[in-house]
Image (cartoon, helix red, strand yellow):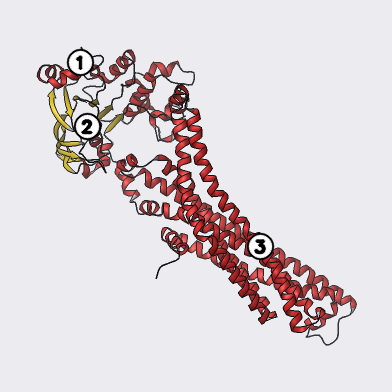
């Protein structure tokens, strides 16, 4: 038997909760049951209390154990006691309801934070290929917004449906006791009309809710693209294009939200009209039954009091049901990713990352390595075999698309070959990949810098108390950055600006070198790290790199051949294969392909 979509989504949330979370949720459910009983008692006691206040002599029937009627003074005293008790009852009821609401919201807020963190954790530990294929706007939307929608716009309304349903059932029980025939007729009418209203918009809400997810992701993507390339946007005068793209995506998202907001307002108007019609119907039916307005007035008052309490409950019920349908797509969207993150052996991964033993003593070896990117028609790397000795400086050269960056990503352990192996000192790096990666310092072409201090950008990802000042300054000096740091009034505590906007290209690259050297790696990998620099700045950065040769194994991808002229060995790549190996001068003499490349490179002799 197929589950209703709302129940399927609830089942998914239940699976994601651990045992402690489930007990908390069940405890909240129990509080809601008690709250509904309080609400029913509150409605049920209003009319008896008013009846006693209207005719104090009715107290004699309540105090049945007394032998004689109450005097006027005693009636006044008992009325005072009952009034205080009634007021305290309502005060306690509302305090209990407030506590119940607070515990609900506290639970939802706690789980929201927990699962958003868990989802981000899952994304951070996903394979590198996942990030190559996934737009960051989608990930940001899922972590920042969709998890919030799961708890605040799906689970909270679901709890509201449960709570309000209990209240409605409890109040229905009270009015059924007063007049079963009319009550059952009214309940049946309300149920049928509510079902018709709900079914009329359910499918449309589901469809619009699914579209909203895509629109929301496109909104974030358009912001990222506009602000991420702000220099090109301004220089090319493309502001209007990005504004138009953002505006269109935002309009689509807001249109979807407008529909659900309108649908959330309709139940109140619908139930107000329904309540008036039902009260009129009750008056007509009771008059037809008894014919005397005075006789039916207490019953009409009871139904009016019940309607007064049921009206907001009915509105909240329909509001919540509409919201649940609209945001059920959020549950489906993040369920698989959260489940994968929840089952991630994080403690093992963290321990794996902490290990740092000197495993690289002799050589790094690639043995018949093949690699094809997901969904690619052709292999990016075809049968590459090579050896790099400890302390050597080697470079990979070749035309764009030759496979240089892919081979380096394989060495870094970010990609896994589908055939062949990569070994260090005879052991596969995949036996303990984290240990191997801890031996590597990586310098990309574009250095990522956060809007923070030099200290935190160099140590990158470490809390202030975890930063080793001695290692920090050793890295600064090795990157030939010490003079620049000393010239700054705040030194290493200088804030560099977003993406290092307050620094020159050479300074950013030196910070990248210092970051790579901070944990004292045995291998330094440079992925076209000087490609964007002018010749003079490049020469300064390469001086810092050359000073490390011999102490570090350096692997470079060259954009300009001038940066690899000092390498012990160059690997010329084409179509994912190594087609020539030798020093710079050897390749000039033996490889026509290398000579052709050398003639086309700026800076080549």
Give the mark nearest the N terminus, 3 or 1. 3
Residue 588 position (above or below residue 146): above
Give residue 52's mark. none
Q: Residues within 10 Å of mark 2 (few under 14, many from 20)?
A: many
In the visual, does 112 lie left or right of 389? right
Give the mark nearest the N terminus, 2 or 1. 2
Residue in the image at 46% along x and 18% along y: 488
Which residue is nearer to you in this view: 250 or 301? 250
Q: Position of residue 126 (x, y in %)?
A: 33, 45
Q: Position of residue 62 (x, y in %)?
A: 78, 81
Give the mark nearest the N terminus, 3 or 2. 3
Residue in the image at 53% along x and 49% along y: 256
Residue in the image at 66% along x and 62% along y: 312
Q: Position of residue 572 (x, y in %)?
A: 17, 25
Q: Is residue 111 visible?
A: no
> Disc 2 to disc 1, how far (Cα)?
21 Å
Q: Position of residue 516 (x, y in %)?
A: 32, 29
Q: Quadrant of the C terminus?
A: top left
In the visual, does 362 lie left or right of 461? left
Quarter assignment of residue 445: top left
Q: Which of pointers 2 and 1 indicates the residue nearer the eye?
A: 1
> Disc 3 to disc 1, how far (Cα)?
80 Å
Which residue carries the number 3 mark? 312
Quarter assignment of residue 353: top left
Q: Residues within 10 Å of mark 3 (few under 14, many from 20)?
A: some
Give the farthest residue toward the bottom.
Answer: 67
Q: Residues within 10 Å of mark 1 (few under 14, many from 20)?
A: few
Which residue carries the number 2 mark? 403
Give the farthest residue toward the left.
Answer: 590
Which residue carries the number 1 mark? 599
> Disc 3 to disc 2, how far (Cα)?
65 Å
């Amino acid at each position: 038997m197929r589950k209703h979509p709302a129940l399927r989504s609830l089942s998914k949330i239940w699976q994601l909760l651990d045992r402690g979370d489930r007990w908390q949720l069940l405890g909240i459910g129990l509080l809601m049951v008690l709250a509904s009983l309080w609400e029913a008692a509150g409605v049920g006691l209003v009319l008896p209390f008013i009846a006693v206040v209207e005719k104090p002599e009715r107290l004699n029937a309540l105090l049945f154990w007394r032998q004689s009627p109450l005097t006027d003074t005693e009636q006044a005293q008992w009325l005072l006691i009952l009034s205080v008790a009634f007021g305290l009852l309502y005060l306690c009821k509302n305090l209990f309801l407030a506590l119940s609401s607070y515990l609900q919201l506290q639970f939802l807020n706690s789980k929201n934070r927990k699962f958003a963190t868990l989802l981000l954790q899952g994304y951070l530990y996903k394979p590198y290929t996942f990030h190559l294929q996934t737009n960051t706007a989608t990930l940001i939307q899922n972590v920042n917004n969709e998890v919030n929608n799961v708890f605040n716009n799906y689970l909270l309304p679901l709890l509201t449906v449960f709570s309000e349903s209990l209240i409605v059932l409890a109040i229905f029980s009270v009015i059924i006791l007063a007049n079963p025939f009319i009550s059952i007729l009214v309940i049946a009418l309300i149920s049928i009309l509510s079902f018709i209203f709900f079914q009329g918009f359910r499918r449309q809400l589901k469809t619009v809710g699914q579209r909203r997810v895509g629109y929301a992701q496109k909104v974030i993507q358009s912001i990222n693209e506009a602000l991420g390339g702000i220099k090109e946007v301004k220089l090319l005068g493309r502001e209007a294009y990005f504004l138009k793209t953002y505006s269109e995506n935002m309009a689509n998202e807001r249109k979807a939200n407008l529909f659900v907001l309108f649908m959330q307002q309709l139940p109140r108007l619908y139930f107000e009209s329904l309540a008036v019609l039902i009260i009129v119907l009750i008056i007509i039916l009771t008059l037809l039954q008894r014919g005397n307005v005075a006789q039916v007035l207490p019953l009409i008052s009871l139904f009016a009091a019940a309607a007064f309490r049921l009206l907001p409950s009915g509105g909240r019920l329909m509001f919540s049901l509409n919201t649940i349908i609209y945001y059920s797509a959020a549950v489906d969207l993040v369920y698989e990713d959260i489940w994968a993150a929840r089952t991630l052996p994080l403690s093992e991964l963290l321990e794996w990352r902490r290990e740092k033993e000197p495993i690289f003593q002799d050589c790094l070896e690639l043995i018949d390595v093949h690699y094809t990117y997901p969904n690619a028609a052709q292999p990016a790397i075809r049968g590459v075999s090579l050896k790099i000795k400890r302390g050597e400086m080697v470079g990979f050269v070749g035309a764009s698309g030759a496979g240089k960056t892919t081979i380096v990503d394989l060495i870094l352990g970010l990609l896994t070959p589908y055939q062949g192996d990569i070994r260090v000192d005879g052991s596969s790096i995949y036996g303990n990949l984290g240990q191997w990666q801890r031996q590597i310092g990586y310098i990309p072409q574009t250095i990522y810098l956060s809007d923070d201090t030099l200290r935190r950008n160099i140590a990158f990802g470490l809390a202030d108390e975890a930063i080793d000042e001695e290692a920090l300054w050793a890295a600064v000096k090795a990157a030939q950055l010490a003079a620049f740091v000393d010239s700054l009034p705040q030194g290493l505590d200088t804030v560099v600006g977003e993406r290092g906007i307050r620094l020159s290209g050479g300074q950013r690259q030196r910070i990248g070198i210092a970051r790579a050297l901070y944990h004292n790696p045995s291998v330094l990998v440079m992925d076209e790290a000087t490609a964007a620099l002018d010749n003079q700045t490049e020469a300064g950065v390469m001086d810092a790199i050359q000073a490390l040769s011999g102490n570090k194994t350096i692997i470079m991808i060259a954009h300009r051949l001038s940066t690899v002229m000092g390498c012990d060995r160059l690997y010329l790549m084409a179509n994912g294969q190594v087609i020539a190996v030798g020093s710079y001068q050897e390749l000039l003499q033996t490889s026509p392909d290398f000579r052709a490349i050398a003639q086309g490179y700026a800076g080549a002799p």
